[in-house]
Image (tube, helix red, strand yellow):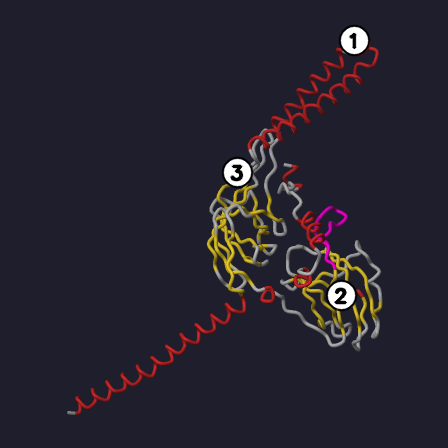
């Protein structure tokens, strides 16, 4: 009897607990579904666009890809550097990650044939965590005709240079009188010898290795059509920090090359209205990227605003430049408290860039998307070897 009673109590306990646990699980699913729906309504307009086959997406890799080190099958990640737009709005926002693998590598060869790397992409990871399957490809390989003509042109340069040197040496060794007496045959002979030396150098010359580094922009061609939801513009706005009484308006953003030809300079045209209780100068400003790297004003740009005091009640308009490590990252124009060194105000460059004129954006694209050959500069040790 006791055993029957104990079994009855145990069965009742399990049934009660099972029913008690079942209800919250169902409620959790409903709540989770509601949250997802609200999130989708906040993120998307409800419209759909198609990422077309043969569209090109601009990206930058997240790690170094080297034809001497990497092998076929190596994984890597890249990041989309420009919003990809359709007719109805943005479908792939800046900052979207792309997963890929190295599909082909080819070492540099004699006759000046360069190394090559081919990259395949299989999916995107959007900032809101969605994975989007795609097929994309990028290769440093030239068209065979273009590659051959480039090698021929380079080798011709070696041969012509060799001929010029050979003729010059013949003139110096044998003298002008010998050249006149032989009706120029000594010069021709010297040029032929020099040409042969130049051709030998061309045949022995090895092509350059390939290096794709973070900050280098690559163009990825899409091989499939994918339907994607359209983002709300306000959902992609970056978070900002404001200080009471300090008003900053960025009216223009230019991407420029530094004196060494590197596209790593961001020049801002800004208007500052200081009705706060603080005094600032250009030295209290910096660009801070999404990795929290801090970049102070550059001496290669307009320096008037850099050394100007901005006191309470002042209104200042001017330009200021910053040299950064990767022009494609997200940046915030940051004002620091002079005493505590803590940020008081952070204005998103990405938010401001949405309002920049189409003409400025086109000029910036020319600077940033300048054609690269991804040629690797040999190390001094390798050159000596």
Magenta range is 252-265
Q: Position of residue 340 (x, y in %)?
A: 74, 74
Q: Which marked residue is nearer to the observer: mark 2 or mark 1?
A: 2
In screen coordinates, is 94 left or right of 175?
A: left
**Marks 2 and 3, how far apart in space?**
46 Å
Asked if disc 3 and disc 1 are in contact, CB closer than 8 Å, the reply is no
Q: How far, Cα to Cα, is label 2 from label 1?
A: 73 Å
In the rendered image, which residue does mark 3 sit on?
A: 106
Tell me the residue that label 1 is attached to. Answer: 183
Disc nearer the start of the sequence (3/1): 3
- The numbered mark, 2 or 1, whose residue comes first in the sequence reads 1
The magenta stretch spans residue 258:
yes
Q: Main secondary structure of the magenta part?
A: strand
Circles 2 and 1: CB atoms closer than 8 Å: no
| Picture layout, residue 254 above or below residue 272 | above
| Displayed quadrant of residue 348 | bottom right
Secondary structure beneath label 1: loop
Point 59% across, 58% down: residue: 94
Disc 2 or disc 3, which is closer to the eye?
A: 2
Q: Is residue 131 left or right of residue 237?
A: left
Element type at mark 3: strand
Residue 215: image location, x then y, percent: 63, 52
| Residue occupied by mark 2 | 285
Quadrant assignment for the C terminus = top right
Number of other residues with Cα within 10 Å of mark 1, as a class: few under 14, some 14 to 19, many 20 or more: few
């Amino acid at each position: 009897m006791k055993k029957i009673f104990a079994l009855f109590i145990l069965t009742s306990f399990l049934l009660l607990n099972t029913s008690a646990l079942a209800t919250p699980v169902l409620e959790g699913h409903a709540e989770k579904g509601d949250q997802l729906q609200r999130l989708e309504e906040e993120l998307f307009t409800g419209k759909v666009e198609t990422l077309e086959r043969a569209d090109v997406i601009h990206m930058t890799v997240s790690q170094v890809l080297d034809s001497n080190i990497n092998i076929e099958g190596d994984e890597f990640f890249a990041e989309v550097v420009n919003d990809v737009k359709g007719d109805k709005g943005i479908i792939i926002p800046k900052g979207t990650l792309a997963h890929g693998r190295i599909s082909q590598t080819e070492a540099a060869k004699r006759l000046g044939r360069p190394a090559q790397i081919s990259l395949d992409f299989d999916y995107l990871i959007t900032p809101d965590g969605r994975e989007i399957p795609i097929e994309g490809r990028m290769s440093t390989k030239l068209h065979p005709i273009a590659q051959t003509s480039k090698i021929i042109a380079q080798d011709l340069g070696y041969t012509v240079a060799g001929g010029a040197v050979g003729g010059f040496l013949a003139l110096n060794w044998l003298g002008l009188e010998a050249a006149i007496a032989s009706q120029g045959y000594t010069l021709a002979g010297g040029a032929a010898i020099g040409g042969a030396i130049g051709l030998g150098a061309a045949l022995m010359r090895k092509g350059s290795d390939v290096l794709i580094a973070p900050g280098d922009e690559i163009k990825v061609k899409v091989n499939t059509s994918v339907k994607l939801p359209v983002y709300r513009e306000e959902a992609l706005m970056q978070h900002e920090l404001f200080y009471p009484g300090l008003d900053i308006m960025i009216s223009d953003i230019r991407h420029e090359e530094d004196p060494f030809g590197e596209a790593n300079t961001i020049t801002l045209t800004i208007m500052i209205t200081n009705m706060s209780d603080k005094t600032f100068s250009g030295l209290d400003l910096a660009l801070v990227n999404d990795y929290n790297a801090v970049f102070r004003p550059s001496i290669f740009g307009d320096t008037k605003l850099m050394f100007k005091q901005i006191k309470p009640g002042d209104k200042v308009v001017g330009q200021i430049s910053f040299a950064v490590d990767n022009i494609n990252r997200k940046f915030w124009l940051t004002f620091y408290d002079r005493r505590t060194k803590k940020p008081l105000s952070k204005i998103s460059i990405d938010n401001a860039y949405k309002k920049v004129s189409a003409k400025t954006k086109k000029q910036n694209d020319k600077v940033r998307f300048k054609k690269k050959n991804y040629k690797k500069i040999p190390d001094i040790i390798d050159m000596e070897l």
